[in-house]
Amino acid sequence: MKGGIEVDQELTDRIRVMRAHFVVPPSTEEIFAAFDAATLSLTAAYEPVVKAFRHSLSATLSTVTIPFALASSSTEQTHFQRIHIAERIRAQKIGEEQVHEGEDLESLRDREASFIAQSRMRDFVESEDGKSIFIRDTCGFLLASLKHGLEPAARELVQQGLVLLWSAFEVLCRDAFETLLNEQPTKIQELVIHPKTRKRFEAESLSLETLVHHGFDLSGRLGTVLVGQNDFSDLPTVKAVYGVLFPTSTALNEAFGRRELWMLYQRRHLFVHRRGIIDQAYPDATGESCTVGTPLVVTPDDFEAALNVVAAAGTALAGCLPMNIAAQQRLAADAPIASSS
C-alpha cells in the first residue's frame, strides 16, 4: 500500500494533467463581484446591456466547463448509489410491525434507506477523505475520457470559449456605445473632432437612405446609426472610441490596454479566420514564439486569464457609464467639500 505522501503526490499529478486539458469552474461570485458592484447604480437604459454581457460570460463558462460538470455529476451519482444500495440492504431488517397505517413495507424501507443514505453522503462529501476521493475520481473520469478520443474535443471547447469571450466583450462595447450616443447625442462632437476617431465617423454626411429610414428624425437614434459605421470587433477601434469618450478614466485605459485582452483579440481572429492555423501576422502581433503553419494551442489557463481580463474590462467600462440620480446624489454627498479662500 502506498504511503500518504506518495498518494498526495499522485493526486497532485492527476490534477495537474487534468487541468491542462479541462477548465475547472472558478467562483462566479469572485468573477462578477466587481462588475455587479459597478453596474448596480447605472441608469435603466444600460440594464439590458450589462445583463446581456453578464449572461454571455456565465453561459460561456457553463459551456467550457461541461466536461467537468459531467465528471463531477457522474462521480457523485456513483458514490451515492454505492451508499444507497448498502442502506437499502440494511433496511431489510425493518419489519411489518414498524409500518404505519397507509404505508406499505417496501415504501418504508426505501424512505428510511434514502434518508440515511443522504445523511451519509453529506458526511462523506464534507470529510477530508471524501473530498480527496471525489477529486481523484473526477480527475480519473476526465483523464479516462482523453483516452477515448475526447482530447481534440476538449481542446476545441477551450478554443471556442475564447471566441465566445471576445464576442461578449465586443457586444458589450457596441451596445454601450449605441445606448450612450442615443442618450447623449452631443458626444458625437468629441468623436468627429478628435484625430483618433474623426475618420471613423461620418455623422456630417449621413446618407439620404439612412435619414429616410429613420423618418428624418435621429433624436434618440444617433447611436443606432453610428454603431454601424464602426467595427467593434476591432480592438484598436474600441480603444480609440472609448479613449475619446472617457479620456480621464485611467481604469478604462488600463483595462483595455492589458496584454491579455490583446492576446484574446489576436487568438480570436486566428480561430475565426484561419481555423487556428498560425500565420506570420500572429507572432508579429503578439511576440509569441510559435511555428507558422501549425495549429495554435490554448490552455484552460489561457481561457481563465481571458475570462478575468474580459470581466475586468467590462467592469471598467461600466464604471464610466451614466449613473442613476440616487447614485449621483450619494456620490455628491460623499465628495469632500472644497474650502473657500
Image (tube, helix red, strand yellow):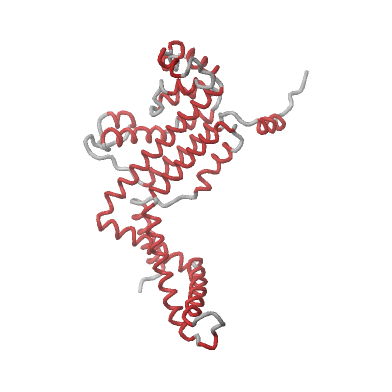
Toward the left, the furthest residue is: 293
Quadrant the N terminus occupies? bottom left
147 sits left or right of 115 in the view: left
In the rendered image of this protein, does residue 107 appear above or below residue 312? below
Residue 281, x across and y down, in percent: 28, 28
Toward the top, the furthest residue is: 205
Residue 89, x across and y down, in percent: 43, 81
18 sits left or right of 324 in the view: left
* Nearer-the-camera pick, 223 or 219: 219
Quadrant the C terminus occupies? top right
Residue at horizontal 52%, vertical 33%? Answer: 316
Residue 132, x across and y down, in percent: 43, 65
Residue at horizontal 52%, vertical 14%? Answer: 189
Residue 161, x across and y down, in percent: 37, 43
In the rendered image of this protein, does residue 333 appear above or below residue 83? above
| Residue 140, picture quadrant | bottom left
Toward the right, the furthest residue is: 341
Looking at the rendered structure, the number of numbered marks drawn on it comes to 0
13 sits left or right of 251 in the view: left
* Nearer-the-camera pick, 212 or 266: 212
Residue at horizontal 61%, vertical 31%? Answer: 323
In the rendered image of this protein, does residue 181 appear above or below residue 124? above
139 sits left or right of 256 in the view: left
In the rendered image of this protein, does residue 19 appear above or below residue 51? below
